[in-house]
Amino acid sequence: MTTNQRIAVVPGDGIGKEVIPSALDVIRASGAAVEFTLFDWGADRYLADGTTIPPDGFQMLARDFDAIFVGALGDPRVPTNIHAKEILLGMRFKMDLYANVRPVRLLDASLCPLKNVAPEDVNFTVIRENTEGVYMDMGGNLKCGTPDEVATQEDINTRKGVERVIRFAFEYARANGRKKVLMSDKSNVMTFAGGLWQRVFKAVAKEYDDIQAQHMYVDALCLQMVREPRSLDVIVTNNMFGDIVTDLAAALQGGLGMAASGNIHPGRTSMFEPVHGSAPPIAGKNIANPVGSILTAAMMLAHLGLNAEAQKIESAVLAAVRERKTTVDVGSSLGTRECATWIAETVAR
Ligand code: NAD
Ligand code: IPM
Ligand code: MN
């Protein structure tokens, strides 16, 4: 008898509540030995009783679950976005999920806004540092609301934090048959933080003589992602640059509706979420693209060692894209549920 792996599910806000149930149907169709526990954390719960995440929430997730599957958090009724900060950034920071893995794969040439680009030309992975940088919320305001006001936002980079994510990128490259790791920063201007990244990258790269180490400033990387995405393999960068370049990378794949991610700490309960947000203007209309969440589900199953099920899901998504059984944002006409049902039925066959 196999025991089921336990997945905590947080659909969250907006289109998260549509795309996550759709992705759960696809996982069920794959026959994966998993069981789901749903949590209602998000804007509705926060507005009802003030709960963002219960006091022991992160310990409970780490103790009782093998993985966490999250939709999106963010709601215009909560202008401070405090619940998103406490739930989503809470998981990343308090559970120390230090590597945000964001694969970038073009499934069909028709999805790419660039001219003359084939699927094999867009196939790289961004590893984003996920626990430090300007996301640490250190800083302050002075003379608030006056003409002389001052705001600071600190960029925190620790040797331990930089080293572990760079090492993760090299290990990821090795484990996935990749040949190059490119570190991207702005060390020509941000000399203190960039200097640390540069020194640590050079030192760690020496341990991996089978992998080519490269460097590019992040502005030049944006140019390269558009002009010659084929040259890219594994990219490692800080939290903020990683956030920005992965929206650009999502566009190369057909938009935010197509992009998947995992927030990983090897050996610990990790969290998986599509790259997109809660998209309030399109929420509740059955038009959101569920593919980013479905590919995220496949990534999560592969992480849990359920490779055959993950493979079946990826093949079905590829078939859906080729047969145009997809949503309006990628130029087809199906609704969220209809697209996911087509994929689930293909997985089940
Ligand atoms: P967004 O990703 O929600 O939307 C950006 C654009 O992409 C919009 O035009 C939207 O319609 C489109 N889009 C996104 N996902 C789509 C999908 N699956 N199918 C079709 N179109 C899709 O980003 P935003 O508008 O900047 O943010 C909205 C809210 O979501 C904010 O509160 C923000 O903080 C939050 N957010 C949360 C996460 C997360 O939980 N991981 C990520 C990003 C943004
Ligand atoms: C992402 C999102 C988040 C981030 C927001 C919602 C805090 O944009 O996951 O890419 O900036 O990391
Ligand atoms: Mn983002």
Image: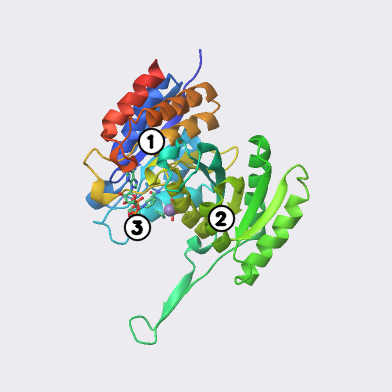
Sequence-first disc among 1 and 2? 2
Label 2 is placed on what type of residue? Gln
Which circle marks residue 224 in the picture? Answer: 2
Q: Is residue 49 visible from the viewing direction of this image?
A: no
Which of marks 2 and 3 precedes in the sequence?
3
Query: Nearer the viewer's eye, disc 3 or disc 2?
Result: 2
Residue at the spot x=41%, y=49% of the render? 88
Q: Say how the picture is coloured.
A: rainbow
Answer yes or no: disc 1 within 8 Å of ligand 1: yes
Which disc, if any, is residue 82? Answer: 3
The span from disc 3 to disc 2 (Cα, nearest Å) is 35 Å
Secondary structure beneath dot 1 equals helix
Image quadrant where one finds the C terminus: top left
Q: Against 90, is 322 above or below?
A: above
Residue 316 is drawn in which quadrant? Answer: top left
Give the vertical position of 80 relative to 125 (above or below): below
